[in-house]
Image (cartoon, helix red, strand yellow):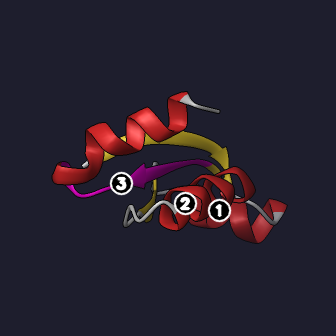
Amino acid sequence: MFLVEADNDLEADIICGFLQEKGVPTQKTDSSPYTGAMRVIGGQAVEVQILVPETFREQAKAFLNTL
């Protein structure tokens, strides 16, 4: 289930790492079919969506609100 959209791959990795340390499973997905091209051209994707299982969504939101 969609949790948040990060501005780029680095931000997504930081958010996912933080949540995974708290025991929340995460998955990254591209927000656009053009994101892969952005990685090739610019080295980083823009707008990466972070997904979590529905049962962890509220817990993940609470963790992110502590930042």
Between 67 and 44, the residue placed more toward the observer is 67
Residue 40, given in percent of the width and then of the height, sits at 74, 71
Q: Amino acid at mark 3?
A: Leu
Residue 36, given in percent of the width and then of the height, sits at 59, 66
Say which residue appears at 70% left-offset and 50% top-offset: 11
Q: Amino acid at mark 2?
A: Cys
Question: Which quarter of the rendered picture does the C terminus lie within?
Answer: top right
Local crowd at mark 1 within 10 Å, few (<14), some, or many (≥20)? some
Spatial distance from mark 1 to mark 2, Cα to Cα? 5 Å
Question: Mark 2 falls on what kind of element?
Answer: helix
Say which residue appears at 65% left-offset and 62% top-offset: 13
Q: Which numbered marker is on residue 13?
A: 1
In the image, residue 50 lies in the stretch drawn in magenta? yes
Q: Is residue 47 above or below residue 66?
A: below
Say which residue appears at 71% left-offset and 66% top-offset: 39
Spatial distance from mark 1 to mark 3, Cα to Cα? 12 Å
Residue 48, given in percent of the width and then of the height, sits at 54, 51
The stretch of residues the image draws in magenta is 47-54
Q: Is residue 17 above or below residue 52?
A: below
Main SS of the magenta part reads: strand
Say which residue appears at 33% left-offset and 43% top-offset: 59
Question: Mark 3 falls on what kind of element?
Answer: strand
Q: Amino acid at mark 1?
A: Asp
* Cβ atoms at labels 1 and 2 below 8 Å apart: yes
Q: Is residue 53 left or right of residue 47?
A: left
Q: Which numbered marker is on residue 51?
A: 3
Residue 25, given in percent of the width and then of the height, sits at 37, 67
Residue bearing mark 2: 16
Furthest residue to the right? 42
